Image: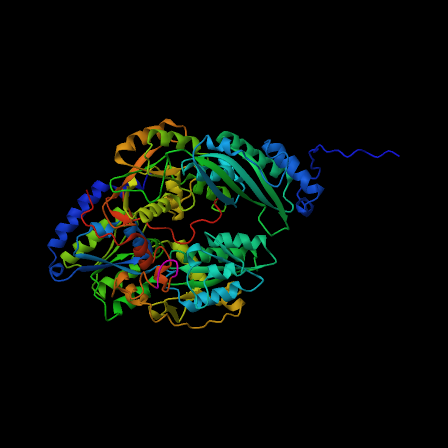
């Protein structure tokens, strides 16, 4: 495929790997422990596994799969709220497909659908709005989920619903924001990260400037990365180069998509529709201040949380589940007590096993190939 | 007094209404009219015409084809009923024919059981029955028995079809999923994933203008050529739901071997790749309805490949991998990028109602 094959070129990969190997050889910390680089975004996690990138890297580099899969960090209580809304007879509940299997305390949306709730998979919030237009006698709720990548499309859909005067549409807002999350990870005491691959799609919206504190305050290098395998290798190389040269900067490998200032119409829509929540609960990470957003009062009539009574119960993560430690990179997926035994993609205990962007599911699906030096 | 004589000759019924009603499932005249007019008339087989409760075969006529019976059944619920490259009727015949063929059997007879939602247009039924008849003729099989049920609105989505098939396995042919050995070769007969992509495109909810056609086709002739060219062939399976990846996993597990495929050698249409790229799907898991995965010994691989390529349904045949030393039950892939990854069984559904 044009514009994709170029970023999957085996020969260029081979050259980059050689460059990475020689860089690593010159980095002192690599002599005592592995260099830990976290990819924040679940899209990167997926690409890393899909192309077998981990197995191509020198053993001195350890990739830590971060919290950037919004499906994975959704707490059980919120899934229960979804089920409660979806169970109402007047409601058509619309959701992205990968949120269907996230376990709630009683059931997932997939089970609720089997039990008779009208739950429909959509590919965009605009599809949900179309369903609302076609079903004026029903209440259509869109399960809004995701970081800044999907926030603007939900905001624009709400603005569209308002200008078209569609009253039977609302949004159950579970959008989360990336910067407080990275900050929470950096503040975690059991953490030993040497650098970050920054999220490409989020940065397309917010730009690169919001990350400056990572370099300035925490002195960690970050490279905003694209999602093709060569993007990822080049970004790893850029992080290593910073480490070797003792720099901590925010660099942009994904300049073909990401600008420093971000996408201003998208940001304007976001600012118009949403405001920060005081705090928001994350699965595995606990409550993170100002990490969630909600609809502003002026859009309250599109807010499913205000339109319907929801239980809003706090449900503790299962005791056996170590998603939090995996998310912070403290343990690897397969070091979790229940990985592959009680917790599998068919019967996920923790959310990291649910989405294909979750580190555990990706590892279960694609990982575990121990052979190194796979570049011919 | 004039009493009309009782007529013993069966007179075929005719349907005079535009749509199916519950009366057509009631067992009375309306049902007889529907079966006669739409199915018996279209399938046109002598064994079906007497409308006994069963089709009857002469054992001797079966035995000329081989020495063992093969028997299989499959249900079809595809949505939409018509899609580029096929429809539920064609699919229902090909699916069962192919399930017989990949066992090394000559497919001979099919049944057709159909569950119809009230309100379905008779014209639509006729089109589907015609498609079944045409496909059966192409595959050289006869539809010899059947059943019709009508359910109320909402109890099924337009119509569901179940076909059951009987075939006879050729003498000396013994294919088995447990027979793969280290060093064996993995082949496919062409581009993978077309059916799954075609169905998804035809649903229209993607707003993608997809020109991809389903590969739905009866494969008995191709498999026939294949087993003649490679008589010691280990195993053949049609890569339907779950795609090629699922078949490979089934082989790896049943044979307790490791299989490695080469992403670069695996034939996938550019449009299907692009489609999957946009939707986050993996083409290896997309359904096919006209593709097989075959395992041969290294000595027969060349002949098998040539036989498939010489057939109209195997022009794009390729060797995609090998059975290798390694963890038993594992399927891995060399990526085009030079990495290596596991190709596991699919968890849950990638797409519902594709066949």
State yes or no: residue A344 in magenta: yes
- Residue A226 is at least partly visible in this image: no
Query: Compared with residue A143, is residue A253 higher up or lower down, i.e. above or below?
Result: above
Looking at this view, name the residue that lies furthest to the top. B310
Q: Position of residue B305 (x, y in %)?
A: 32, 31
The quarter holding residue B333 reads: top left
Q: Which residue is located at x 38 percent, y 63 percent?
A: A176
Q: Is residue B138 left or right of residue B313?
A: right
**A41 lies above or below B192:** below
Q: How is the image coloured?
A: rainbow
Q: Main secondary structure of the magenta part?
A: loop
Residue displayed at 26% across by 49% down: A52
**For the point 29% across and 33% down, which residue is it?**
B301
In this picture, which residue range is highlighted in magenta?
A342-347
Quadrant for the N terminus of chain B in the image: top right
Q: Residue B326: percent from the left, percent from the top?
A: 23, 48
Whether residue A162 sits left or right of residue B185 in the image: it is right
Residue A128 x, y percent position in the rendering: 51, 54
């Amino acid at each position: 495929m044009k514009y994709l094959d170029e970023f999957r070129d085996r020969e260029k990969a081979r050259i980059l790997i050689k460059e990475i190997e020689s860089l690593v050889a010159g980095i002192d910390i690599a002599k005592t422990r592995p260099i830990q680089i976290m990819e924040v975004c679940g899209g990167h996690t997926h690409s890393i596994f899909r192309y077998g990138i981990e197995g191509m890297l020198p053993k001195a580099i350890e990739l830590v799969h971060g919290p950037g899969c919004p499906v994975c960090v959704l707490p059980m209580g919120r899934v229960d709220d979804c089920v409660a809304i979806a169970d109402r007879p007047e409601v058509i509940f619309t959701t992205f497909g990968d949120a269907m299997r996230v376990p709630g305390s009683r059931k997932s949306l997939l089970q609720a659908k089997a039990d008779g709730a009208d739950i429909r998979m959509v590919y965009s919030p605009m599809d949900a709005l179309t369903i609302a237009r076609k079903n004026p006698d029903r209440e259509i709720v869109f399960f809004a989920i995701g970081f800044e990548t999907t926030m603007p499309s939900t905001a624009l859909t709400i603005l569209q619903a308002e200008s078209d005067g569609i009253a039977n549409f609302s949004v159950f807002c579970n959008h989360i924001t990336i910067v407080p999350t990275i900050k929470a990870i950096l503040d975690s005491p059991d953490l030993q990260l040497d650098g970050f691959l920054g999220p490409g799609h989020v940065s397309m919206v917010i730009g690169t400037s919001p990350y400056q504190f990572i370099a300035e305050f925490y002195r960690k290098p970050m490279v905003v990365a694209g999602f093709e395998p060569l993007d990822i290798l080049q970004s790893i190389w850029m992080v290593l180069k910073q480490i070797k040269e003792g720099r901590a900067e925010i660099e942009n490998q994904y300049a073909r998509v990401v600008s420093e200032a971000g996408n201003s119409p998208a940001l304007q829509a976001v600012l118009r529709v949403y405001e920060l929540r005081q705090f928001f609960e994350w699965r595995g990470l606990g409550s993170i201040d100002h990490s969630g957003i909600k609809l502003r009062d002026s859009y309250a009539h599109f807010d499913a949380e205000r339109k319907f009574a929801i239980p809003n119960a706090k449900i503790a993560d299962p005791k056996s589940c170590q998603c939090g430690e995996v998310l912070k990179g403290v343990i690897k997926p397969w070091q979790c007590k229940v990985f592959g035994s009680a917790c599998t993609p068919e019967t996920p205990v923790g959310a990291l096993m649910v989405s294909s962007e979750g580190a555990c599911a990706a590892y279960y699906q694609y990982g575990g190939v121990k052979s190194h030096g796979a570049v011919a | 007094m004039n009493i009309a004589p009782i007529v013993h000759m069966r007179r075929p019924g005719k349907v005079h209404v535009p749509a199916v009603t519950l009366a057509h499932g009631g067992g009375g005249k309306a049902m007889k009219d529907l079966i006669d007019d739409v199915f018996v008339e279209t399938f046109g087989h002598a064994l079906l015409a007497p409308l006994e409760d069963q089709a009857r075969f002469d054992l001797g006529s079966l035995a000329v084809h081989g020495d063992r019976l093969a028997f299989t059944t499959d249900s079809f619920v595809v949505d939409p009923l018509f899609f580029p490259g096929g429809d539920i009727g064609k699919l229902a015949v090909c699916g069962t024919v192919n399930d017989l063929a990949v066992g090394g059997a000559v497919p001979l007879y099919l049944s057709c059981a159909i569950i119809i939602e009230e309100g379905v247009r008779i014209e639509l039924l006729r089109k589907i029955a015609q498609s079944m008849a045409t496909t059966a003729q192409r595959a050289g099989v006869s539809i010899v028995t059947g059943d019709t049920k009508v359910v109320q609105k909402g109890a099924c989505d337009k119509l569901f079809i179940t076909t059951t098939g009987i075939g006879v396995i050729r003498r000396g042919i013994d294919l088995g999923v447990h027979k793969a050995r280290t060093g064996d070769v993995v082949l496919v007969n062409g581009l993978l994933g077309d059916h799954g992509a075609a169905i998804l495109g035809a649903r229209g909810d993607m707003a993608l203008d997809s020109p991809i056609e389903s590969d739905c086709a009866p494969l008995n002739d191709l498999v026939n050529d294949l087993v003649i060219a490679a008589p010691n062939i280990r195993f053949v399976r049609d890569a339907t739901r779950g795609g090629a990846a699922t078949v490979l996993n089934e082989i790896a597990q049943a044979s307790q071997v490791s299989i490695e495929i080469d992403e670069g050698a695996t034939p996938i249409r550019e449009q299907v790749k692009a489609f999957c790229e946009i939707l986050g799907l993996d083409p290896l898991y997309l359904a096919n309805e006209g593709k097989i995965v075959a395992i041969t010994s290294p000595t027969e691989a060349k002949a098998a490949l040539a036989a498939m390529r010489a057939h109209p349904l195997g022009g794009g045949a390729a060797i995609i991998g090998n059975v290798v030393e390694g963890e038993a039950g594992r399927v891995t892939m060399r990526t085009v990028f030079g990495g290596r990854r596991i190709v596991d069984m699919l968890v849950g559904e990638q797409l519902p109602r594709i066949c």
